[in-house]
Amino acid sequence: MVTKPLGRKKNTDRIVGWLLVAPCAAVIVLMTIYPLIQVFLFSVSNVKLPFFETTFAGLSNFTRILSKQEFGVIVRNTVIWTVASLLLRFILGFSAALLMDTGMKGKILFRIAMLVPWVVPSIVAANTWRWIFNTDNGLLNGFLRMINPALTQNWLGSSSLALGSVIVAYVWMGFPFIMLMLVAGMQGIPNDYREAAQIDGANSLQVFLHVTLPCLQQIIVILIILEIISGFNSFDLLYTMTAGGPGIASEILGLYIFRTGFSNFDFSGASAIGVMLILAITVAFLFYVPATAKGRGHK
């Protein structure tokens, strides 16, 4: 007699729960899942404007994009961009985190100063760095002129310097995130571990190598994966500073998708590039899930 009412109540609660999450679920489907499905459909179709009429094309869009000579250059730029920014962000972020983990004076002011690049909106940061790298009136060339006028460079207009110049701005913007994550991880290490190592005669370097680094292993793995995903997805800073130029010297896959789809109106090709980028990011995500699960103590 009691079981039925309880069963009805559970069913009612379940229905009410589904009704409450239905609006959010509908928004997620409309804003993420549907566009994703549309990208996959466009990638295997010929899209005819202006009404986006599609006819099945198989893998021809992929082979067409892969056969372009510029695609190899852009993939190389993307790899350089991702790897270089990852290494430099980690070097700066780790150095700042180690400084903040010590008992240095003015640690609060130092932490605030280190957070400024992360707080500044990306468009503001991009325009600021574009002014710094300006050939005629930029701060960097102005400083170099005082030392030796021959040292000045066309930082954003040179095919050999443009990508590296934007990487500098990108690293400046992103290293505080790594710093914060590492500081949080360091503060979570019990002091007993370090004290025990020091009692056993370990110096500061040995404590760092054998205590701090192993305890930060899971955070480091997760940060590396997130930085790889962020590097592949970069767009706004590059578009504002160089728009991929000169030529395609600083163009990466995110900009290539934009140029192919919205400048050349080749939505089939842009979708094919997008699918390849999604697959690359999915590979990184496959490493991210086990890393986060292991960090929570799951096998």
Image (cartoon, helix red, strand yellow):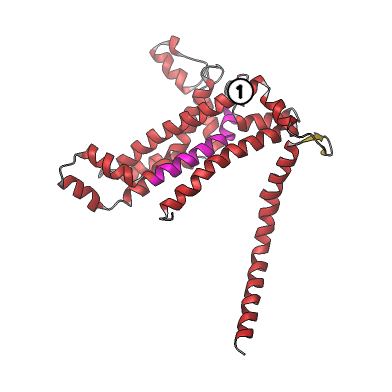
Q: Nearer the viewer, residue 112 or 256?
A: 256
Position of the N terminus by quadrant: bottom right
Relative to 43, is 14 on the left or the right?
A: left
| Badge 1 amino acid | Gly
Instruction: From this view, report whether residue 51 is shown above or below residue 63.
Output: below
Within 10 angstroms of label 1, few (less than 14), some, or many (20 or more) residues? few
Residue 64: quarter of image? top right
Instruction: From this view, report whether residue 267 is shown above or below residue 286.
Output: above
User: Which residue in the structure is indicated by mark 1?
Assistant: 72
Q: Nearer the viewer, residue 50 or 296?
A: 296
Q: Nearer the viewer, residue 68 or 158?
A: 68
Residue 169 percent across, percent down from the top left: 49, 30
Residue 165 percent across, percent down from the top left: 50, 24
Q: Does the segment drawn in magenta span residue 242?
A: yes
Relative to 244, is 289 on the left or the right?
A: left
Does residue 215 appear anywhere in the picture? yes
Residue 247: quarter of image? top right
Position of the C terminus by quadrant: bottom left
Does residue 177 appear anywhere in the picture? no
Which residue is situated farthest in the bottom direction here?
1
Q: Nearer the viewer, residue 154 or 248?
A: 248
Residue 179 percent across, percent down from the top left: 39, 41
Q: Residue at left 40%, top 42%?
A: 220
Q: Does the segment drawn in magenta span residue 245?
A: yes
Q: Residue at left 61%, top 30%?
A: 253
Task: Give the magenta-colored segment's residue range.
Answer: 218-246
Is the magenta region chiefly helix, strand or loop? helix
